[in-house]
Image (cartoon, rainbow, N blue to C red):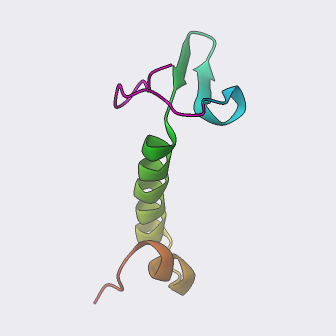
Amino acid sequence: MDCSLCKKPIEKYDLTFNHLKIDESCEVDICQNCIDKFFKWQGSLFAKLYPTNAMKKRFGKKSN
């Protein structure tokens, strides 16, 4: 099984953790590396939208 984003083989594929069903017509399989990158990107967006100290510590730098 290959990752839909990076096209690399998914090691230790698990339907529960690597398969994302977006809607009835769109489903993708994503490797853990791409999931981690997506999570980090999403976290940095949340840190900008909701600039709490915990979010800044985890995902971004404090803004001046």
Residue most extreme to the top: 25
Residue at position x 54%, y 15% in the image: 26
Figure check: 18 above or below 44:
above
Q: Quadrant of residue 40?
A: bottom left
Which secondary structure type mostly characterizes the magenta part of the structure? loop
**How far across and down, in percent of the image, does residue 9 sit?**
43, 26
Chain part drawn in magenta: 1-12
Residue at position x 51%, y 19% in the image: 1
Q: In the image shown, does 13 or 49 lie closer to the viewer? A: 13
Figure label count = 0
Asked whether residue 45 is in view, the answer is yes
Q: Is residue 8 magenta?
A: yes
Relative horizontal placement of residue 44, taking residue 16 as reference (left or right): left
**How far across and down, in percent of the image, does residue 29 sit?**
53, 25
**How far across and down, in percent of the image, does residue 42 sit?**
46, 55
Q: Quadrant of residue 14?
A: top right
Asked whether residue 51 is in view, the answer is no
Figure check: 34 above or below 28:
below
**How far across and down, in percent of the image, does residue 46 sit?**
48, 64
Residue most extreme to the right: 16
Figure check: 2 above or below 63:
above
Residue at position x 46%, y 70% in the image: 47
Which of the image's four quarters has the C terminus? Answer: bottom left
Q: In the image shown, does 16 or 22 lie closer to the viewer? A: 16
Q: In the image shown, does 13 or 60 lie closer to the viewer? A: 13
Residue at position x 61%, y 19% in the image: 23
